Image (cartoon, rainbow, N blue to C red):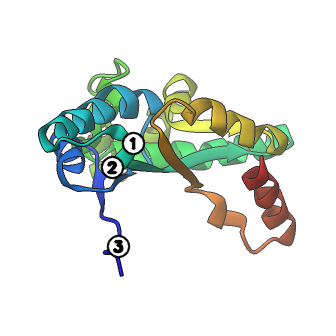
Amino acid sequence: VPDPPVYISAVLPYMSRLVGEVADGIHVHPFHSPSYVREVQRTAIEEGLARSGRSLDEITFSCPIMTSVGDTDEELEATREHARMMVSFYGSTRTYSPMFEHHGFHGISDELHALQKRGDIPGMKALITDEILDHYIVTADWNGLGPALVERYRDLAPHVRVTSYTAAQNWSDPGSREKWAHVAQS
């Protein structure tokens, strides 16, 4: 019986290099942008792969995706606000500041951290503008979500698995499960 595959959850480049050296895959943090994964994490993984004599074909990228999905403006707005809260929460962890800095949003993690320490949740959400939010989430209607995910992640690596980080919010609704099944078939 073969050993189970080894996935490493990595955010920072030194952790990603380790993925390339010893792991079968990377569990990408839900707070990511495809650009950060391509330009920072994949580059570091490739450095580790070079050290170990392996190729990118031997690594699977497992990417949980924060989504904003709905068929009405109200549904989209509600799911965007939920995602905005998640981005502000994760972003308040200063270890994740490279996610913001990669896109030129310097100092946001420090500001979010200070607001979190004061318990100012509305202030945290207000810092995450639509411009910032759109780097880290995928927004689409139900029919467009599958194609949007494919387009956003198609050239990330030879082996990519995407999962919804937010699907469980409404999983008890049979209509929602049918919509997610349609997305999975896209």
Provide residue 93's location: percent of width, then percent of height. Answer: 27, 47
Quarter occupied by residue 77: top right
The answer to which of 44 and 137 lies nearer the viewer is 44
Q: What residue does disc 2 label? A: 116
- The residue singled out by tag 3 in the image is 4
Residue 120 visible somewhere in the drawing: no
Q: Secondary structure at mark 3?
A: loop
Please state which amino acid type lies under the numbered disc 1. Answer: Asp
Label 2 – label 3 distance at C-alpha: 39 Å
Report the residue at 79% width, 37% height from top.
144
Q: Amino acid at mark 3?
A: Pro
Q: Quadrant of the N terminus?
A: bottom left
Within-10-Å neighbours for mark 2: few <14, some 14–19, many 20+: some
Q: Amino acid at mark 2?
A: Gln
Relative to the observer, which residue lies in front, 171 or 126?
171
Residue 87, by quadrant, is top left
Residue at position x 87%, y 65% from top? 175
Q: Is residue 47 above or below residue 17?
A: above
Residue visible at 27% across and 51% down in the picture: 117
Q: Secondary structure at mark 2?
A: helix
Q: Earlier in the sequence, mark 2 or mark 3?
A: 3
Image coords of residue 125 (percent x, y): 49, 40
At horizontal 84% and vertical 63% (from top left) the residue drawn is 178
Q: Is residue 78 visible?
A: yes
Left or right of 29 in this view: 95: left
Q: Residue 53 in the image: state x and y as whole percent.
A: 18, 41
